[in-house]
Image (cartoon, rainbow, N blue to C red):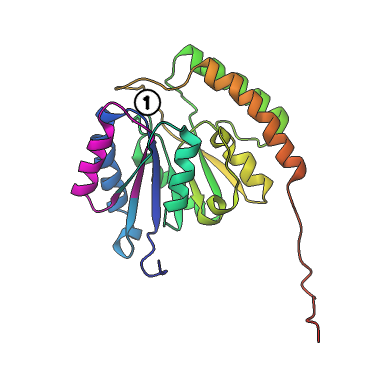
Amino acid sequence: MTELTRPWVSVVIPIKDERDNLAPLTEQLLKVLGTREESRTASFEILYVDDGSTDGSGPLLDTLAARHPEVRVLHFDRNYGQTSAFDAGFRRAAGELVVTMDGDLQFDPADIPALLPLASRYDLVCGWRKDRHDNLVRKLSSRIAYLARGLVTGDRIHDTGCSLKVFRRAVVERIPLFEGMHRFFPALAKMHGFTVTEVPVRHFPRAHGRSKYGVGNRVFKSLYDLLAVRWMQSRCLRYRLRTDVTRDK
């Protein structure tokens, strides 16, 4: 793909059984991105990754893709998890910027423009759900994870679990992903020398479907994964070439 045809932004959204949310989410994204000044001179794309849905989300995504040229769909042959979905989306996203978000309508695509301007100064811009509309279990588990993560990684980001983020392309091409690592995008980005900031965004109660996370697969798994992140931080390659290197004659 040439620079002339490269989309200015790709929105990558993992989907697992979100059938009732897909049509309104797509319409909102098309409206928000289609009215941006950037879309007058370059295309944009919405890339859904169907993570083994069994509720009819897959066929509906194909219908949306047939109806809207901006929509692309990847289908896993079974459920592999959110990190795998992000990885597949990153590998196929063509945009200069990559936006991530969930497909549960708990984020408003209208908040994306609040993050975009900072992408000219920072490599990764993270959303921050200051006023969360989750149940007590999810709020408590997120608080525990935040405290533990801050002690271990030092990323100083309040809400790494917020999926609404804007990445510059170099970040998604550089950071390594393993299962569960989507929870540590800011720490992984900083580990490789990228700059990170955060912006408050709105958060809404879930209207359709149900959450895929609880204490067992959120808190305990996140705490275990912290050990892997800390190991990577301690072993990450960091070097610079001298600018006065001369060629061999």
Residue 25 x %, y %: 29, 37
Residue at x-position 56% and y-position 32%:
180
Q: Which residue is identified by label 1?
A: 204
Residue 208: x %, y % from top left = 29, 22
Please tell me which residue is depicted at 62% across the width and 46% down the height of the picture.
Answer: 189
Q: Secondary structure at mark 1?
A: loop
Q: Residue furthest bottom?
A: 249
Nearer to me, 215 or 101: 215
**Image check: 10 left or right of 207?**
right
Q: Please tell me whether residue 81 is drawn above or below residue 86 in the rendered image.
A: above
The quadrant the N terminus occupies is bottom left
Q: Which quarter of the picture shows residue 196?
A: top right
Residue that sits furthest to the front in the current view: 77
Asked whether residue 121 is in view, the answer is yes
Near mark 1 (Cα within 10 A), the count class, few <14, some 14-19 or many ≥20, is: some
Q: Tell me, yes or no, if residue 165 can be seen here.
A: no
Q: Amino acid at mark 1?
A: Phe
Position of residue 137 relative to residue 54, above or below, is above
52 relative to 126 in the view: left or right:
left
Q: How many marks?
A: 1
User: Is 51 covered by the magenta stretch?
Assistant: yes
Position of residue 102 measured from the top left corner of the image (x, y, whole percent): 40, 34
* Part of the protein shown in magenta: 46-71
Q: Quadrant of residue 135?
A: top left
Name the residue: 54% across, 36% down: 182
Check the picture and name the quadrant holding the C terminus.
bottom right
* Camera-nearest residue between 97 and 213: 213
Residue under the image location 27 percent in, 29 percent down: 19
The part of the image, by quadrant, that contains residue 197 is top right
